[in-house]
Amino acid sequence: MCFSDKEKAVHYLSHINYYRLEAYWLPFETSRNPHQFADGTQFETILNHYLFDREFRLHLLDAIERIEVSFRTQWAYHISHAYGPHGYLANTKGLRKDERRLFKDIADLKEHVERSDEVFIKHYNDNYDEELPPAWVSCEVMSLGLLSRLYANLKAYNVRRNISKTYEFDEGFLEGFLEHITYVRNVCAHHSRIWNRHLTKKMPLPRGKPAGLRDNIYVDSANKTEHKIYNTLVVVQHLMTVICPESNWAKGLAELIKKYDIDYKRMGFPLEWERLPLWQFELSK
């Protein structure tokens, strides 16, 4: 590896763990034992990928936050409308797929509520007798993972359908996507590398709904693109058009890739991805 500015390299290595940065230079190694790099590999190139990944994580988390807040709202509204304020806790016949799973999820929710220092939770505890708040209160202290499990355990097709159609998805795809995006969110929230990560929890591929979304999906089994982040970004961008139609999230993504001159194929992107219908429309706004 070449160092054009050793003082700069020493500075960054004093603040970024060597083993953390190592994950970003692995693609540039020609040998692991002993460590050998491709000719001309610059430390600045490695650092460039690290800085890109940091900004990319934050950009992705910005979208995931909006998706999570929207899903909380839809879940609370539809389950309360169908089964009442505390219906999400009820072991009603035909409402759940797995009763034991429900008991475990309620226990997890109790821990979330007990740990919460939110003003609205204190207000509820001071004024009401029920142990757990109504759905529209509880959802605000649930993790995305718990919300995802509660949706997955719903047997009531009418509630699942009404939530999923808000996003133009079928209910089965939404279930799989929520599980996947919870995994992605946790990777990002723990400041872990995401840009070229091999995602162990694959994203399910959309079926017929919404019309045309599948045309933007890219699958190249030889290069295992189904384990990369690109297809996740397609669905995230679709959701941004539903939730935040005035958002420039797609443009922000394109600008990040251009700013750092990243080889986007390592992220599972197809060549000329900007020409695909979803991206072309958003980038031309």
Image (cartoon, rainbow, N blue to C red):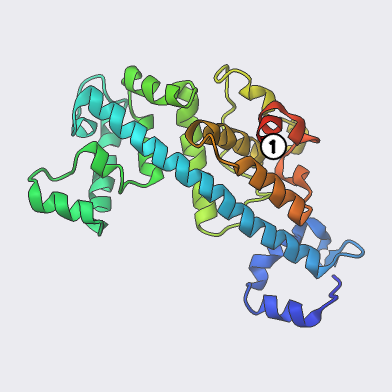
Say which residue appears at 52% left-offset and 50% top-offset. Answer: 61
Q: Which residue is mark 1?
A: 283
Say which residue appears at 59% left-offset and 17% top-offset. Answer: 211
Q: Is residue 188 above or below residue 96?
A: below
- Residue 88: image location, x then y, percent: 24, 32
- Residue 164: image location, x then y, percent: 43, 25
- Residue 86: image location, x then y, percent: 18, 34
Q: Nearer the viewer, residue 103 or 264?
A: 264
Identify the image quadrant of residue 207.
top right
* Label 1, residues with CA under 10 Å away: few <14, some 14-19, many ≥20: some
Q: Amino acid at mark 1?
A: Leu
Q: Nearer the viewer, residue 118 or 101?
A: 118
Q: Is residue 199 above or below residue 35?
A: above
Say which residue appears at 38% left-offset and 30% top-offset. Answer: 152
Q: Is residue 34 above or below residue 121?
A: below
Say which residue appears at 10% left-offset and 43% top-offset. Answer: 130
Q: Is residue 42 left or right of residue 284?
A: right
Report helix, strand or loop for mark 1: helix
